Image (cartoon, rainbow, N blue to C red):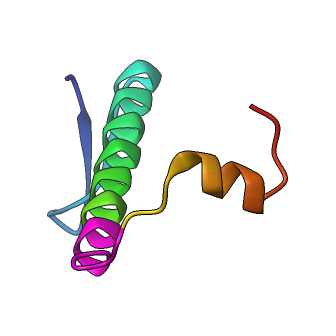
């Protein structure tokens, strides 16, 4: 990653990076957020009885 650092009053203020690097970082952050949400949901569902897939499909009136 090649970032250019801009300073203001002698302190690092901004980082400018290539668009492709930005997209990679953004995707990584989204993946991390998804992982955090998954772990949270998994923790919250501990001890709960699982619902069979067929029952969920039927209750939501979905087609297989």
Image height of 24 relative to 55, above or below: above
Image height of 22 relative to 6, above or below: above
- Residue 45 inside the magenta-drawn segment: yes
Near-viewer residue (10 or 48): 48
Number of numbered markers: 0
- Residue 3 inside the magenta-drawn segment: no
Near-viewer residue (48 or 6): 48
At a point 29% along the width and 71% down the height, the residue shown is 40
Quadrant housing the N terminus: top left
At a point 15% along the width and 64% down the height, the residue shown is 10
Residue 59 in percent (x, y) is at 75, 62
Quarter residue 14 falls in: bottom left
Quarter residue 7 falls in: bottom left
At a point 31% along the width and 38% down the height, the residue shown is 28
Residue 13 in percent (x, y) is at 27, 61
Looking at the rendering, the stretch of residues picked out in magenta corresponds to 40-49
Quadrant housing the C terminus: top right
């Amino acid at each position: 990653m090649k970032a250019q650092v801009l300073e203001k009053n002698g302190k690092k203020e901004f980082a400018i990076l290539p668009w492709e690097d930005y997209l990679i970082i953004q995707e990584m952050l989204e993946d991390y957020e998804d992982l955090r949400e998954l772990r949270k949901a998994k923790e919250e569902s501990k001890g709960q009885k699982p619902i069979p897939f067929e029952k969920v499909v039927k209750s939501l009136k979905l087609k297989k």
